[in-house]
Image (tube, helix red, strand yellow):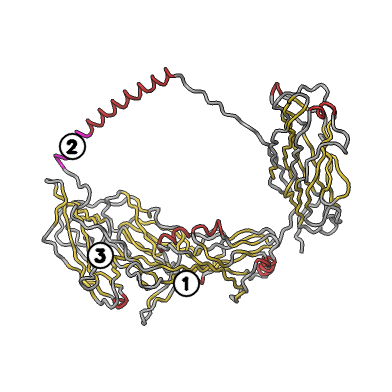
Amino acid sequence: MKTKQLIYLGIAILLSGASLTNLPTRVSAVESSRSSTSESSSTMSQSSVSVESGNSESEKVVSSESKAEASATQSSQKTTTDTISKVRAIKSEPTGTPSSAQTPSKDGWSFLLTIFRKGFSVQPQLEQYVVAKDTENPAKFTGMKMLTGLLTLSKKTNVTRWHWDSASATWVLDANVKDKIDSNGLLGVLGFLNIDDYVPSNLAVGEYYYQFDFDDGIWPLQSHYYSKLARVSVSEQPVPATAIDTTANLPKVVYSDVDYAASALITPSNSTDKITWKASSDSDKLAFTPDNGRQSMLTAGNGYVNSDNKYVEDTYYVNQVNKDPNVFGIPANFAISAGTALSTTKNIAVGGLPAFNKAADVGGSWSVGGLSELVSTTGATKPWHYVWKFTDGDGNAIATPTAAEGVTNTEQDITDLTQLNSEQPLTFAKDSSFMKKAAEATAAGKSYQAQLTLTTSIEPEESSTKAAQKVTVVSNKAELQATPATGKLSLDAVPSFNFGTITASKIYNGTLDPDTAPNAGVGDTLAITDTRVPASGVTNDWTLKAIASKFTSGTGSTVKTLNPVTLQLSNILGIPGSQALTETENTIATKDGSATAGGTNPSSLVKASLLMSPNSTIQLTDGDAFSSQITWNLTTNQPTALAVK
């Protein structure tokens, strides 16, 4: 194993008469990657940027050209605008929305049969493209749902329609359309109503807008709820789709029992093909409401409403065990189709929790997926509470590990759930005793499993006196695949040295007397980690060597170089005596299989004295700053790294 560490150390000099004043020294330690087969190095470089300003004449010319170009552009825009106006005068295309339409109410929202906001919980399809006189696939509003007050067994939904009038270039209210749609459902006693399908009649070729509304409550406390505007475009001929996909708003990771908006992306956008959504197989527990149209709501899991009008939460995905560390949950697939010939399969992950696969002595944090989308779709604004629970390979509960066992952030509150992975992730320390036990379980073929439960409270918008309702979301289960400790030898920290103010006379005359030589103060950290045990017949050894470059100041033709310098190092990893760090690579510390160098993970504050040869001919000037680069090499003769048991 060979590891390089690069260090800058420096002497900053200012000349004032016969004395020198210290300048701040830039010191940097760069830790390279460590492996038994690779070697890396890093150096510090400085770069300067020179900015040259243009002359005023050039600027004037550019300004003049810009004005001329702008003038030409304005002229072009005017001509284009005039042309468009003439075209519209001949054939007016639909623009905007009806001015007499009502502002849509907020979407109705509920979770696990608790209504937090009344209104349309499933909106009408926002766009439909149909062919005139197509009786098999007419314009149809299906799957709409409303949330109302309790004990509402039925309710009428009003229909308002507008059509585009080309002659006046406006949306015109169709006052003769006064349809009312029935709404009902077994959960009406809880305020959940399904709106009957609505098929508009006698639609000629043209453009239409629809809006639906209903009243709730008793006058004078009655509230009115309006749907979003829904556009219907009727063409003379079919327009087949050439491509279909989902828009970017559909999350890649979802949680059971939570409703997520899904939208189709069709090419061309005015295709008249019927759009359908469907789970790919029986093992994909995905429901779409409605299952046709360009917009739908996706819900994962097998949750249902029982005979007592209680919602029974998902038991499918929350009990599935993820064994893949690269997938944030349990894979699930669905198909979205346009017509009968065009279809594409999409995949998502349900539950948010990947498997965790790490060596027992490495440590790390367990990430969770889909948190931002969960927060936005639930509308939660209050803090969340999270709890990690563990079971063994047979499903038996394991006591929650503690910080003393090397595990932190197993249960806490968090203000912003989206920051869970960065601020409060479940974390395993490198020396975690819990991970060592988990590794034994994994080796026996019965990996530990983890599951995350998230809880918050949401206040219903309909009544300020109604208590906030508790909302609980549960992840899938996932394996804790703790592999045996591999053992490692690494150079974790190397020292840098700042020798402070040095007088010019010491530069000229040298500082070879160890008793009076400049020193770098209290010292800096040198640390090595060695979690290996020797293989049979092999010594668990290592050797640390270092070499310093020449002390220089300036660059190019102005560079100044000091005569050979020795750094006399002491307090090295508990080793008695001192070692010389020179311009020739020297051994600084060794371990030969015994406790020569301070045990398994030696560390110390290394001190340094600066022994300079005389520099009687050097020319020192104001601003001189000398620095040297140190390269550290940690090597071993042991061919393999085994774990400490």
Q: Compared to 547, does 356 lie above or below?
A: below
Which of label 3 and label 2 is nearer to you?
A: 3
- Which residue is disc 2 drawn over? 85
Q: Compared to 24, does 462 lie above or below?
A: below
Which amino acid does the dot numbered 3 rest on? Tyr
Rendering coords of residue 526 (x, y %): 76, 48
Label 3 and label 1: CA atoms lie apart by: 36 Å
- Which residue is disc 3 drawn over? 225
Which amino acid does the dot numbered 2 rest on? Ser
- Taking the magenta stretch, the answer to whether it contains residue 571 is no
Of pointers 1 and 2, the one earlier in the residue sequence: 2
Total numbered labels placed on residues in the image = 3
Region of the chain picked out in magenta, as a range: 81-91
| Secondary structure mostly taken by the magenta-highlighted segment of the chain | helix
Q: SS of the residue at dot 2?
A: helix
Rendering coords of residue 239 (x, y %): 25, 51
- Which residue is disc 1 drawn over? 316
